Image: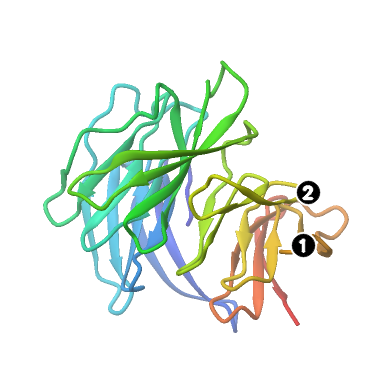
Amino acid sequence: LQRPASLTGSLVIINTATSAVERVIPLSDNPSDFDLTADNQFLYVVTQGGRKMHRIHLEDWSTAEKPLPATPDENHPAVRYRVAAGAGTKVYWVDGQSAPTLHSMDFATGLETGPPIVPEGTGFGAIARAGDGSSLAAWAQFGWSAGSYGSKALVVDTSGASAVPGARGVLLERDPLDTPVITRSGSSSVFMKKYRLSADLSTVEVEYPADVYAATGTPGIVFGAWEAWKERTLTKVWQAPEGVTANICAVSGDQSAFFYFNTATGTLVRVAMS
């Protein structure tokens, strides 16, 4: 995603074998997060400046968009919108209030399917589709810009018409606010903050040296912002070159390489995994 603060954003499709830009799809202002549907047919992109939900068909690249409902505090500077694709045309998004709330939406109608959720007076951070798609894994934080120490793992039940809070999980460290939730199809583990958690988010299975930003599609390698480790043994297998300000972005679909964005030079770098 290209996400300038005040200009129209875009989705850039890059051929990772040739590094060529194959397509640029215009979006509304400041796209902040995206997620694939479980069948890999659609990509949802939520835009914070444009306040829209975009849906892109990955076969013919056709696009559709729906406006997001207004919220009392739409753009707190410490918070960015998040999105997770649900079953069918359901999509879930976290707004930009000081204590962010979770919304459930039917993209076909553009309407919310239930009241927004605030987890016990705290705010939602990252969300991700979990397990068979009947729930979301999330972390919720105490205090955000000010307040109590810590955050917690949280299950959200999405099996019904609207999302409802589910079981609370383990307590986590507080910041940073940009850490994702990472799930795998059919996997029994979830990654958030510095941890690999059990599927029900009740148990810490592994604690990593730093916050996790990406993981291979099958158990193997886990990535922080500047280094990577073997998932089970924590052996370091990669370190960003000296002087490089890196941010891990993604692992390729065939698991042959990973990509990081060098924030100092504005370049996307491919690293082969042998």
| Residue 110's disc number | none
Q: CA distance from mark 2 to mark 1?
A: 9 Å
Residue at (54%, 34%) from the top-left corner?
Answer: 152
Judge left or right: residue 259 versus residue 9.
Answer: right
Q: Secondary structure at mark 1?
A: strand
Judge left or right: residue 117 versus residue 220.
Answer: left
Contact, mark 2 vs mark 1 (Cβ under 8 Å): yes
- Which residue is label 2 attached to? 209
Give whichever of 219, 92 is nearer the camera: 219
- Expressed as whole percent of the image width and height from the top left, the position of residue 113 reads 17, 43
Residue at (36%, 44%) from the top-left corner?
Answer: 156
Judge left or right: residue 23 versus residue 212.
Answer: left
Query: Is 73 located above or below residue 126 in the figure?
Result: above
| Label 2 crowd (10 A; few <14 / some 14-19 / many >=20) | few
Give whichever of 197, 4 is nearer the camera: 197
- Which residue is label 1 attached to? 229
- Expressed as whole percent of the image width and height from the top left, the position of residue 238 reads 81, 65
- The amino acid pointed to by label 1 is Trp
- The amino acid pointed to by label 2 is Pro
- Sooner in the amino-acid sequence: mark 2 or mark 1: 2
Query: Is 218 located above or below residue 10 in the figure?
Result: below
Q: Secondary structure at mark 2?
A: loop
Q: Can the viewer see residue 49 in this picture? A: no
Q: Can the viewer see residue 82 in this picture? A: yes
